[in-house]
Image: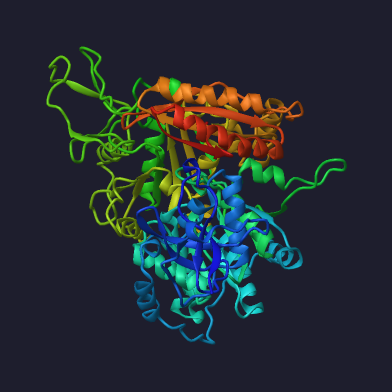
Amino acid sequence: MRREISVLVPTPAYSRLTGPLTYETQEDLQPGCLVRVPLGQRDTLGLVWPQAPEQPATSAHALKAIHSVLHGIPPLSAHWLKLIDFAAHYYQRSAGEFAMACLPPSLRDMTALQFERKLSRLKPLAPVSAEKALQPPLTPEQTQVLAQLAQHSGPFLLHGNTGSGKTEVYLRRAARMLEDTPQAQVLLLVPEINLTPQLEARVRQRFAHLGETAIVAMHSAMTPAQRLNSWLAAHLGTARIVLGTRLAVLASMPELKLIVVDEEHDPSYKQQEGARYSARDLAVYRGQLEGAQVLLGSATPSLESWHHSRAAVEGQPAPRYTRLSMPSRVGDGALPMLRRVDMNNQPRKTLLSAPLLAAMRERLGRQEQVLVLLNRRGYAPVLHCAECGWKSECPHCSAYRVFHKGDRTLRCHHCSLTQAVPRACPACGNQDIGVLGHGTEKVEESLAELLADVKRPDGSPLRVARIDADSTRLKGELVKQLAQVHDGEVDILVGTQMVAKGHDFRRVSLVVALNPDGALFSADFRAPERLFSLLLQAAGRAGRDAQLGAAQGCEMWVQTFHPTHPVFEFLKRHDFAGFAAQQLLEREQAGLPPFSFQALLRAEARTQQAAQDFLNAAKALGEARLPADAGGLSVYPAVPMSMQRVANVERAQMLVESPSRKYLQQFLAAWQDDLQQLRTQHKAVLRWAIDVDPLAI
């Protein structure tokens, strides 16, 4: 019997094919089934979509038949389909594009026969062992938080200082959920891949009794085959615990009962390409949709989450989250003392001040470890000729090529252009080319030279190691280097923000922050929040061993040209609440998020003029659509992006802002038709995209 079905296919928002397409089939297929369908001249994966009740019948001769059905697994759940539908509408993408991006890449390319063979090779569920791992004793604060989690539904914001034992709370709550419901599933989200192996090892040790196949990871560093295996395990219910980065929030988990978002403040939870979704916000929505408990955790919560968990005030909207607090460290470990070095009083071009070097010598003499934070990789950010003023600009981007001394290259961190360092200035021939600024490579080299007289107990030189995106490029290198730090083989660790959060370095007693001033006066209103969070998280790496902290104390040193800046005053007191209150007051007065809602329309073209012409035309059409009761919605003029040119593509953006999320969403939805029509008129525009709730403007 011939039937008509609606099928989502991977079509981008600007293609005008934003909704499901109609196909015919002889089978009775439920919404959520995966099928192979013809689309133009190719065969593609499709998702059977719920048919709209008012959808008119289609002429039989106009329909194409589906090619095949991927049998062997249950359809994706109605809750999952609603999640995709909501996310696509909210983030202004086509539902088909969003749905296909949530599925494993290899699944999108599989034929029905290949999929059948794949299912036949899946490992059976390992038997559950009765023996459980030993659990450490709980602190009174952890006990109180777990009691609140058991009594209320949430969502919750757990504000716990670094070292207060948030991970133990996550594991205890997960264990309770898994014990209470035989088929329950738990989702643990972490912001970055480099945090996953460490947490995965701890989760596998704690839940070893569930069997090896009951715990899976999901992140972009996995091979396509690994990602497909993890996705199938989660969808079929054999995976009881899924540990992953932001893409895991959209995994199919039919028995989901608990979602944990660790380091919920981290901007890595916001996707910056394609469908620009926030995994943290979708986690909260998914919890409400599926009746799963949601727990957001951080030592430095985002100001949005902090505001949403404020105390209830009569006459104001009720808070969205319940705030839980764990201010004390496990074992009564002390928080580090902040010391500021005023670089205005240091000799010009000083990289490491004399007082700081003395403090490092003292710590290293006691066989303690030092962590040095510099959020800039490479040897130096700019190569410079003093004779003619030439700088190592990238010919394809609005950025400088960074000097990497290890392989003697100039490398653009935006378009990846890599060239050998010139023997002489390309502009004037001067052979004396110098460097401006410093990166992690230069700090690593300088520390080895400045502290060459300090020896390890066996008489060998100090070991200075570096962890950044360059040193950990090879597979397995990050895990190897972190193991060396934990085993005490490293005395000084130099790194970018990769080492500032989530790591439990037991012997670190001194943390150093070099050159953090760049964010103090940024045009981005979120810059102070990000800086405070980074520094407080980095400070939390010191003194995690309570005995070490009690015996010697732990410190964080900050070298700055602005030692009296309010950010450092709050940091000295470890006063996140005070910092948040001050920042939220400023944002409320300025009408900035979370007291308003924003979206960016971005355009890319071969010329900046073409990109801005498209945006300004869109602005004119958009403002013509604004009703009289638009609720204060504003469309600002087009401007170049801060990184204006990348890989010879010019980029511009335009801000849309409203005090009402509802009005903003209505405007963006109506605006889509205008943007699609404008694209046909502005041929020079390569692509455009809407970014809802942007984190960088």
In the image, residue 564 lies at what x, y percent?
A: 57, 25
Using the image, determine if residue 115 lies above or below residue 395.
below
Left-right relation of 681 to 264: left
In the image, residue 413 lies at what x, y percent?
A: 32, 37
Residue at x-position 43% and y-position 44%: 497
Using the image, determine if residue 267 lies above or below residue 7.
above
Residue at x-position 36% and y-position 42%: 361
In the image, residue 445 lies at what x, y percent?
A: 26, 39
How many numbered discs, if any?
0
Left-right relation of 604 to 297: left
List the single residue furthest toward the right. 314
List the single residue furthest toward the top. 388
User: Which image quadrant for residue 433?
Assistant: top left
Q: Nearer the viewer, residue 682 or 642?
A: 682
In the image, residue 374 lies at what x, y percent?
A: 39, 38
User: Which image quadrant for residue 400?
Assistant: top left
Q: How is the image coloured?
A: rainbow
Residue at x-position 43% and y-position 40%: 512
Whether residue 328 is visible here, answered yes or no, is no
Quadrant (top left, top right, bottom left, bottom right) of the N terminus: bottom right
